[in-house]
Amino acid sequence: MSKEKTEKLSDKLLYKRKNGYETLAAADLVKVDDFCEGYKKFLNVGKTEREAVSAAELMAKAAGYKPFKRGDSVKPGDGVYLINHGKAIAVARIGKNTLDSGAYITAAHVDAPRIDLKPYPLYEDGDMALMKTHYYGGIRKYQWVALPLELHGVIAKADGTVENVSIGSEPEDPVFAVTDLLPHLAKDQNTKPLGTAFTGESLNVLVGSTPYADEEGDKYKLTAMSILNERYAMTEADFLSSELSFVPAGEARDVGLDRSLIGAYGQDDRVCAYSALVAMLDQTEIPEHTSVCILVDKEEIGSEGISGMQSEWFDTFMDDLCQAQSVKLRACYENSVCLSADVSNAYDPNFPEVSDKRNNSQINQGAVVVKYTGSGGKGGANDASAELIAALRKVFDDAGALWQMGELGKVDQGGGGTVAKFMAKRNILTVDVGVPVLSMHAPFEITSKLDVFMMYKAMKAFYEAESL
Ligand code: MN
Ligand code: MN
């Protein structure tokens, strides 16, 4: 067999994973950078689920979308949105077909691992003021010490007013930190396993060190409290009805000599939230199927609570939309398709032992389709159907959206889940599609700009698909 003939046969029969830079057109390269500048701004203003939802609302409003309420009539092309207690948002664009032909839904989450304050956070010790915390989501505690932190959240007062808190994001703002042990005295700690060397109770955040003049007792605590009082007119009792979180300080940055990567806090899963939302808002034609983009809270702790994906709030919103077209919700769901838009782990050359490289997503190979998540033999997985993936293959390929498939690490290594199974439970065909991430859940997560853009292209192609 001649060499030429062999190559042709291999082109035809064998699948080759492609690095996006080998195929990307020069015109698309400019689009990648433009898109990612917008994405970085979104990351910088959305460091909590509430802030991300506010940013998403502004984007929807700017695109002409209007708040939706039960009983409103809708017509093809209308853009509407609904906010759930400030922590989740559903955005919809009404399609040409009525909802009994199904909606095309993307579901991403806007919460991220962080360090929340306890109800009685403020105390003093060693002539310093500190705050007790209770971390949220899956953090590796050692990563959260000795780095600058910002304080974000809300204080709801008994008089009904709500103060938005943000300290640390402006250049003139102070930041906060959890102190760490000096290596000189770490002999005992160094012998402990990584998972137990740092405890939840040791993640106490340093917030001040000056005594309040002319006061007896608790004077370091009092200084901190007096500054908060000046800034937010709050007393210590107001901590009881607050949601305050320490999050990593600093803005999203380009990473690498070639600036091909983005480093920032909270990219899981604001990268998919942003890509999916912009894909929806960018549609120029009225879609065949109603497009829905839902950005939810609480994914990192099991999609629980009123603002998580398990909440019936989503069903209520969809039912109200269906009612506007005299359609039954179950008829809508059984013809709907959902892309559970969440990140996956990128192959990391520093830790090759945790991945099956052949089946792991890789940086710069585009959006990653994950057929099943779960752990221990696909336990807890959604497991999307072959037919759905086949349909998406065509949609993504036809649109020039580079994509790959991936598994979250080696079979027996661990695993994870997404909102996918909660959408599938609603009788909605669902598959996970996301962006590969390095250092997932760390204070500084890394994505590739090309992958972020390809995620957007994939989401847009999905919304514009005539059928699946
Ligand atoms: Mn996620
Ligand atoms: Mn996560």
Image (spheres, rainbow, N blue to C red):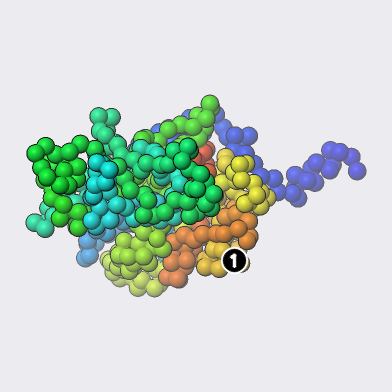
Can you give x and y, in whole percent of width and height, for residue 462 in the image? 48, 52
Outermost residue toward the right in this view: 1
- How far across and down, in percent of the image, does residue 56 sit? 31, 47
Dividing the image into 4 quarters, which one contains the N terminus?
top right
Q: Dot 1 lies on which element?
A: loop
Residue ID at (53%, 26%): 257
Kindly identify which residue carries mark 1.
376
Q: Mark 1: is the Cβ under 8 angstroms from ligand 2? A: no
Q: Quadrant of residue 313?
A: bottom left
Side of 294 relative to 432 (left or right): left
Is 335 placed above or below 356 here? below
Q: Position of residue 326 (x, y in %)?
A: 30, 70
Residue at the image point whose x is 31% and y is 39% from the top: 176
Q: Residue at x 44, y 55 (%)?
A: 138
Q: Which class describes the residues within 10 Å of circle 1: few (<14), some (14-19), or many (20+)?
A: few
| Vertical placement of residue 467 versus 326, above or below | above
Circle 1: residue type? Gly
Tell me if 314 is positioned left or right of 353 in this view.
left
Q: Tell me: residue 377, above or below residue 220.
A: below
